[in-house]
Amino acid sequence: MSTGPTRVVEVDPARLDRWIHGFTQRHGVPERSPGTDPAAVPLVLSAPDGALAEVLAWSAEVVELPPRLGLVLLRRGGYAVGLAEGEQLTDHYCGTRYVQSRTAAGGWSQQRFARRRGNQADALAERVVQQGADRLLDPRGPRVDGLVVGGDKALVRQVLDDPLLARLAELPRREFHDIPDPRLKVLQDTLRRARATRIRITEPS
C-alpha cells in the first residue's frame, strides 16, 4: 500500500495512552512491533488502513526519557540554565548579556566591530558555562541524566566545547534551535517539549 504525507508530533508523556487511543479510533486497532532499528524507533503502530505511528527514541543515545534533565539555552539577547526533576524545574537562572548583530560595514571599522562582537559572545558563553557548572555539575559528575540545549547553534557549541562542561557534553542530548530569546517561560516551554514523546505519523494515501 502506498503512503501519504508524514509529520512528527510531540505528545506529553501523561497523554501518550490517550493519544494512542485516539489513533486507534481514527485508523483501527494497530499491530504493535519494534522498528527495524529499535534503538531509534522502539515502537511502531501499524493500523489496518495503512497509517503508521512510529514512536521515536528520546535521542540518538537513549530510548527512554531521562528522569533528570539539564537545560542550557542561549541567544545573543540572553540565556537560561535549568535543572528539572520530571516535569518540575527545581533550579534555574535566566539572565541577559547583549551581543551585537552583524554589520555590513567594511574595512578597519568592520574588523573592530567583529572583535567587539567576538568579545561580547565570549563573555556570554563564559557566563553560561559558569552557570551550567554551578547548577548541573557536582564534584562526582553531572547532576542530570540528559541535556537539553537550544538557541544559537554557534554559541551552544562554544559553551559545550568548554572543558569545564565536558561531562555534560557527553550526556544524551536533545536540541531546539527554534526558540526565542531565553526567559523563564521559554525555559518552561522547552522543558515541556524536551519531555514530549516524538511520534512520526505516516498517513495512508
Image (cartoon, rainbow, N blue to C red):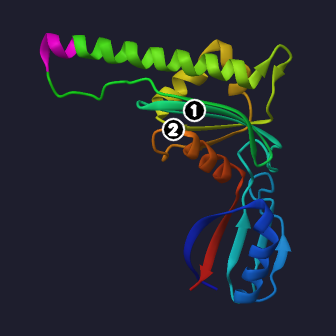
SS state under label 2? loop
Labelled pair 2, 1 in contact (Cβ < 8 Å):
yes
Pointer 2: what residue?
182
Neighbours of disc 2 within 10 Å: few (<14), some (14-19), many (20+): many
Q: Which residue is found at the position 68% from the left and 26% from the top?
A: 169
Question: Mark on residue 80?
Answer: 1
Left-right relation of 194 to 104 = right
Where does the image place residue 129, in percent across and percent down from the top left?
Answer: 60, 19
Q: Amino acid at mark 2?
A: Pro
Question: Mark on residue 150?
Answer: none
Where does the image place residue 41, in percent across and percent down from the top left?
Answer: 75, 59
- Vertical relation: 35 (above or below) 21: above
Q: Which residue is found at the position 60% from the left and 24% from the top?
A: 160
Q: Which residues are magenta?
A: 106-111
Q: Which residue is found at the position 70% from the left and 88% from the top?
A: 26
The reply to whether the magenta stretch includes residue 86 is no
Residue 166 shows up from this direction: no
Residue 32 shows up from this direction: yes
- Vertical relation: 155 (above or below) 48: above
**In terms of image quadrants, where is residue 202?**
bottom right
Q: Earlier in the sequence, mark 2 or mark 1?
A: 1
Magenta stretch secondary structure, dominant: helix
SS state under label 1? strand
Quadrant for the N terminus, please. Answer: bottom right
In the foreground, 79 or 62? 79
